[in-house]
Image (tube, rainbow, N blue to C red):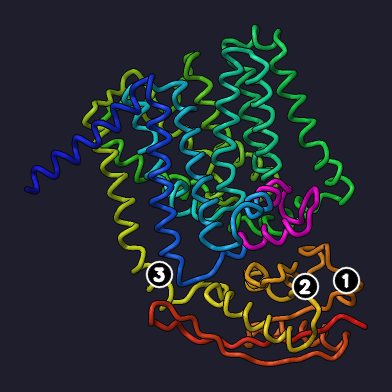
Amino acid sequence: MLLSRLDKLSDAFEVVVDGLSDPARRRRVALAVVAAYAGAWWLYGVIAKSSQDINADMAEMVVWAREPALGYPKHPPLLAFVVKLWFAVFPLTDWAYMLLSMVTVGAGIFLAIELCGVWLDGDKRAATPFVLALIPFYNFFGLKFDQNSALIPLWALAMWALMRSLNSRSAGWAALAGLAAAAAMLTKYWSGFLLAAMALTVLLDYRRNAYWRSAAPWITASIFLLTIAPHVVWLVHENFPPLTWVETRRTAHSGAEFLRSLSEYTFGTIGYSAVALIAGAALIRPSGAAVRDSWWPWEPVRRPATILFWTPLALPIVVAIALRITLLSLWNSPALGLLPVMMLASPLIAMPRLAVMRLAALATAVTLTAVAASPLVALIILRRGVENNAEYARLAAAAVEVQWRQTTSSPLRLVAGPFALVNPVAFYVADRPSTFSDFSGYLSPWVSETRIARDGVAIICPAQSDGCIAQLDALTAAGPAGRRTEVTLTRHWLGFAGPPRRFVIATVPPRP
């Protein structure tokens, strides 16, 4: 009986791999595989994170969407517009936000298959989604929709469109390359390294003479510049807030700090790739010559892949050394989409059908194991607690709403408190308020004394946070009399209880 089931499972993997290898069906099959994969990880996320509340960075983007602008204190504006559009269609809930995360990851894998297909064909192309499925950026980390995960499909799209534009020099692909690159820059300035890689690619490609004599490069550049122009105007007018944020948060204060960040950036990136690399080595068993030919090929056909893969990984180190900026390996989320090409594209690498099937089985096993373990993950999260009070945001929002209704009949338009608490609280409050995050005018440029006087404010602080309580006291002393209480909140999940936590809530009603 067991052997019969294993045979049927093997047959199923062979059907999938055969479909991914077939030029007539591969896109349809890839869409089905990606949809199933994204659906499975969405289910994992919904269950595993059901004992905690929305991530603060994700909630912050919802707040940004409530304050439309051409730029924000930490990042360009594109994701705020994406979030606003998404929640115009879907309800403002955790599961819907998780769905956006996994749609983004799924789109990233599908576009990476198309990109890798420039250099991979047959069974090697079929291996692409299973290699990527072993990289945490495409599952565990992808559950958090943020600037890093959003770049995964955008970088793949920009690179793929560039390669198609280089080959065909058509206006459509040239325009798409410019638009995708602009979207990446309007998501995170880290995409400057993508632009550098794209520029080097077209300068060093063997088709460069025909390409530069065509309209394609000028179409790409024009679309890119026109698309980012409004944000650039905002950036200059506001004196470059996101760059100020990077300077204040990422400047190394000592040589030791810089070396630690460089080590984390380098070895962390290798670590994120480790499972895929080890699995590939175990299944393919490449020779030393094949390994050398895989990772730094300079022959004309594979040269663009070399440039597009290595430039965004290596160039940040050069910039960091020059500017003494600390780096994070997590920022390389979009840079590993070409890893299957580097692993498999060499003609010295043989990829038997059986190896692809085993790779597919491994990726499937990891996914199904994660889904099966998700209730246990949720319970562990509940018992151990989550940093930044992430398990209390929904309960805190309800407590804030009750106190606000007891204070005034006006809608709640503004919530103040620590960044990691107040943004998730604002996500769950029914009136959809904005935030006064960390009581900082820099993080919340839409807040002023005039607005606080007009709309009032609710403030929430962890009871043990003396700095937050001092800010709460200052706000309540400056406004009309409201209410102040201390509440103890305990998160419950399927009959289990997490640790209790005390919070202080104060309300300042609008001035008459």
Q: What stretch is highlighted in magenta?
A: 57-82
**Distance from the alpha carbon under mark 1 to that under mark 3:** 40 Å
Front position in the image: 261 or 486: 486
**Distance from the alpha carbon under mark 1 to that under mark 2:** 9 Å
Q: Is mark 2 on a helix, strand or loop?
A: strand
Q: Where is residue 430 in the image (x, y as percent from the top left)?
A: 67, 71
Residue 464, located in which quarter of the rendered image?
bottom right
Q: 125 above or below 450?
A: above
Visible in this render: residue 292?
Answer: no
User: Which residue in the protein does label 2 denote?
Assistant: 414
Front position in the image: 188 or 452: 452
Residue plotted at (27% across, 23% down): 350
Q: What element carries label 1?
A: helix
Q: Where is residue 169 in the image (x, y as percent from the top left)?
A: 63, 13
N-terminal of the pair, mark 1 or mark 2, is: 2
Q: 152 above or below 470?
A: above
Q: Quadrant of the C terminus?
A: bottom right
Q: Is residue 320 magenta?
A: no
Q: Where is residue 198 in the image (x, y as percent from the top left)?
A: 62, 26
Q: Is mark 3 on a helix, strand or loop?
A: helix
User: Residue 451, which numbered label?
Assistant: 1
Tell whether 361 sits left or right of 110.
left
